[in-house]
Amino acid sequence: MSLDFLQQRISTQTARLGVIGLGYVGLPVACLFAEAGFNVVGVDLKAERVNAINAGISPIEGREPGLAELLATVVAEGRLHTTTQYADLHDCDVVTISVETPVDEQHVPQYVALRSALRDLGPVLQSGALIIVESTIAPGTMARLVKPLLEESSGKRANVDFYLGHCPERVMPGKLLANLRGVSRVCGGETPETAQTMIALYRHIVQADLDPADCVTAELVKTVENAYRDVNIAFANEVALICEAVGGDVWKVRELVNKSPGRMMLYPGAGVGGHCITKDPWLLAYEAWNKIPIRLIPAARAVNDGMPLHILKLLEETLEIAGKELEETRILVLGYAYLEDSDDTRNSPSEVLATWLREWSAEVLVHDPFVPGYQGNVLAMAQGCNAVVVMVKHTEYQNIDLRALRAALTTPIVVDGRGAFSAEQAQRAGLIYRRVGQG
């Protein structure tokens, strides 16, 4: 099948689509293409997730506007079916791959899921199919790993028997559908013709710019944009530490800095989590590590990784004000997801904090309204605790009755790692309050 013929099938929604990986990226992608009129088959190795989706139930918790309703609709109308079997992709004209691409403790990419997907897809790959990797990968991975492994597993030749592209996702939990529809995408193709075919495909679901590029450019754009965010968060966090040291208020400083044209200082906080920002800077630097000195990215990662430990220090100092030692205290940690109003716990700073607290012999209670196992009544859980630490700015926490919270606590201490409250609110409630970045 030629690219011209594939474009015709795409334009008439008669192309059959496959989506490998049905998590935060793959599931909404599958739903949107199904909504656009394509027949979509999704593959995921987790049978429980597959069964839920086929029943029209979204396995993604947290606030995801429109996703559960869209999923129920496209499943009921028969346009989306999911399976654990790669064999069901045998007649797909287009297959997207959205699997995790983590790094190990030495910051080396670990493409176990990606390699597995390519090996399992190859034997059932239809001639003339277009394969698009949406996962974030280190620059050079398409040429170094994806292309040769798919050629090996399929026995076919890239750009002759199948076509290959990279269109990295740009989504955040809580905004999955909105981001997929409204944020521009880079369509990196092995050839310019492949890139144009990708644009024709994504135009069915993306209302923003679709920019053609080669694969390396697409790989660079995604890893650069997440490294950029990580570095800027680290700057905000370091300014917060400076403000504490000199008696300033980073929240007021940030507000006034951002009044200057061209300035956009980000929020400081209790740490950076999630699947992307914690590892994509290392993906960006991976191939260049032994060729040029990499200084800024490791420094930013160290600052952001150190913030949960800094919150522990603030808690210890605040307990001392109340005449308490950290050991043998009872601490309530608010929030276990890495992002507000989400259930995504990957690389959670709260997990790091809780581990350290337990190492200091503190009793740790964790609450999160979106994470199973940590749900419950906040005020009931606060009863008898020595302190509360806010690690995630969930909407529920911003609406807490602080006077009722004070009444529940044995010692009225709140350490705020996200700026969920103001010093004035805490003072009116009679709390001993410490906010990150406030001296």
Image (cartoon, grey):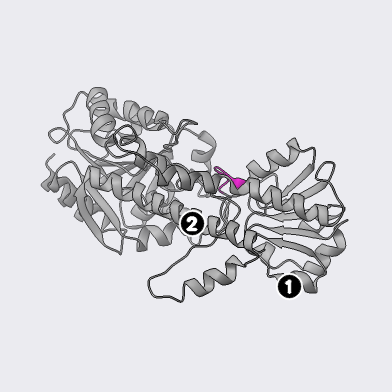
| Kind of residue indicated by mark 2 | Phe
| Kind of residue indicated by mark 1 | Gln
> Is residue 383 within the magenta segment?
no
Which x, y percent locates residue 236?
51, 59
Against 293, residue 337 (above or below) is below
Instruction: Please state the extent of the stretch shown in magenta in the rendering.
Output: 344-349
Q: Residue at x 18, y 49 (%)?
A: 195
In the picture of the structure, the residue carrying the numbered disc 2 is 235
- Residue 354 quadrant: top right
Answer with left or right where residue 319 lies relative to residue 14. right
Answer with left or right where residue 370 lies relative to residue 167. right
Circle 2 SS class: helix
Against 19, residue 391 (above or below) is below
Q: Give the mark nearer the N terminus: 2 vs 1.
A: 2
Magenta stretch, main secondary structure class: loop
The Cα atoms of the two marked residues, 2 and 1, are separated by: 27 Å
